[in-house]
Amino acid sequence: MSDSYLNFANSSFGAKLTNLIGLPKPLLLARYRADQPVINGSVLLGGSAGSELLQPLARAFAAMAVQSVAHHALPQWVAIANQQGLMTGRWGVGDQPGAKVKALVFDASGLTDSSQSDALYQFFHDAARSLLTCGRVVVIGRPPESCSAPRQATVQRALEGLTRSLGKELKRAITSNLVYCANGAEDQLESTMRFLLSPRSTYVSGQVIRVGKPTADAAVINWAQPLAGKKVLVTGASRGIGAAIAEVMAREGAQLICLDVPQAQTGLDEIAARLGGRALAMDISSTEAPALLTAAALADGGWDVLVHNAGITRDKTIANMKEALWQSVVNVNLSTQERINEALVEAGALKSGGRIVCVSSISGIAGNLGQTNYAFSKAGVIGMVQSMAPVLAERGITINAVAPGFIETQMTAAIPFTIREAGRRMNSMGQGGLPVDVAETIAWLASPASAGLNGNVVRVCGQSLLGA
Ligand code: NAD
């Protein structure tokens, strides 16, 4: 489904007309291209006294070949960056802002009291106008729940309000996200920084991401194809978001097992053949599915990644809903995932270092009229991710979820026009996301480099107002 207003507003005639009559103009979002660097422009670094993450950030930036400049309140960055062989310099002279930058990164880990928040004000006040279109803001702090002093926990928690407001205020397709990096997890930042600074995260904004200690020993990462040689199951792969997930996983080097219902066999065979994967026609809600999948995984020598994407909607207000509609949605979207995870993990068919990525929905966060069954199932997916994360960590496996907002698919094309337009526009990007935006987020969570990400629920919703 394409967004004709977005296309019109970005045509030469449409741009003139929307300017003339003052209509909002959603911008074309930058998306991943193989011929582009991780980030297309330099990063402006800010921080406060006692910033603790500058060394790991410099190492990550060196690995990404990022160009950086230092805000005047963070002069120590220049020496730290130089040690890592990074191109760097100071940004701005006196009161004059420096050149335009593609990202603002603020190390807030040193903040221990709200009275120190001036450092945040100064940095974003100075730099907000210097951020390019489709730019990035990343604030990095310490998880409030791990802070020993209440005042430190308080100022760290306050960062959420700042980053979310920046996402709404900066506009121009700029994303703003907060990363809480646990003590001892500093070397796990790279995978998340690569994702958040790059165009892959184009529809992820207003999110809080927790990076913890790795669940398994560090692997050597091939950043060009992090999933090379990995066996990846994608459910619901014949179309929509599932097909995009399969495409991105294949691009990242995965050996795919593409699963969908037997009725979708034609589309399934086509995508599996195109991506060099295997088609598996199966109804995941059947009682035999967990055992069949376990046997298939064991026959492959174990799988590395499970992506639970298959899902259905059967919308009705609860007073009008037949029991079968409730049961089928809860079964396909939630109970089935629980059964499959348990069977594969019990049998050792999901390898150590494995990844489970589930697809929830903002409906599971905000609730939705006519979707009690769907929202129950998708909120349950979040519950499953959060409760299973510590259990699976003991086996070196991570589990995370994405929660898409309005994504342009056949599912959303079926929504009545006025509700569809509201869903599309009520977010900081003024447009719906594409299936590839969900897929890129899943690929980041599924990467061997993301061993520090466990129990996260990341919305891919362009900072939708729903459930915000
Ligand atoms: P879609 O209907 O286009 O694709 C879903 C796929 O899952 C289909 O190919 C379908 O055949 C398959 N499937 C359904 N039941 C199955 C079963 N029992 N066994 C095997 N395969 C089964 O939907 P989509 O828009 O691509 O959505 C994909 C996921 O994203 C779903 O979990 C959905 O709830 C979620 N989601 C979508 C949006 C959106 O805006 N499109 C928003 C939030 C969440």
Image (cartoon, rainbow, N blue to C red):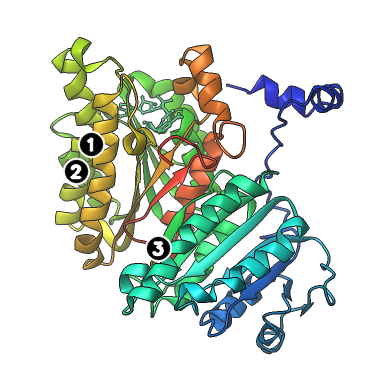
Residue placed under numbered mark 2 in the picture: 338
Residue type at numbered disc 3: Arg
Q: In this view, does 138 lie to the left or right of 306?
A: right
- Number of residues whose C-alpha sits closer than 10 Å to that of mark 3, classed few (under 14), some (14–19) or many (20 or more): many
Tell me the quarter of the image containing the C terminus: top left
Instruction: State the count of labels.
Output: 3
- Number of residues whose C-alpha sits closer than 10 Å to that of mark 1, classed few (under 14), some (14–19) or many (20 or more): many
Specify whether tag 1 is near ligand 1 (CB below 8 Å).
Answer: no
Q: Earlier along the polypeptide chain: callout 1 or callout 3?
A: 3
- Number of residues whose C-alpha sits closer than 10 Å to that of mark 2, classed few (under 14), some (14–19) or many (20 or more): some
Residue at screen point 48% across, 36% down: 465
Residue placed under numbered mark 3 in the picture: 210
Q: How far apart are marks 1 and 3 (CA)?
A: 24 Å
Residue placed under numbered mark 1 in the picture: 334
Q: Is residue 353 left or right of residue 192?
A: left
Q: Distance between the residues labelled 2 and 1?
A: 6 Å
Query: Visible in this render: residue 217?
Result: no
Tell me the quarter of the image containing the N terminus: top right
Specify whether tag 3 is near ligand 1 (CB below 8 Å).
Answer: no
Q: Earlier along the polypeptide chain: callout 3 or callout 2?
A: 3
Which quarter of the figure has residue 446? bottom left
Mark toward the viewer: 3 or 2? 3
Q: Do tag 2 and tag 1 residues touch (Cβ < 8 Å)? A: yes
Residue at screen point 53% across, 14% down: 418
Specify whether tag 2 is near ligand 1 (CB below 8 Å).
Answer: no
Picture layout, residue 368 above or below residue 128:
above
The x and y percentages for residue 407 are: 51, 31
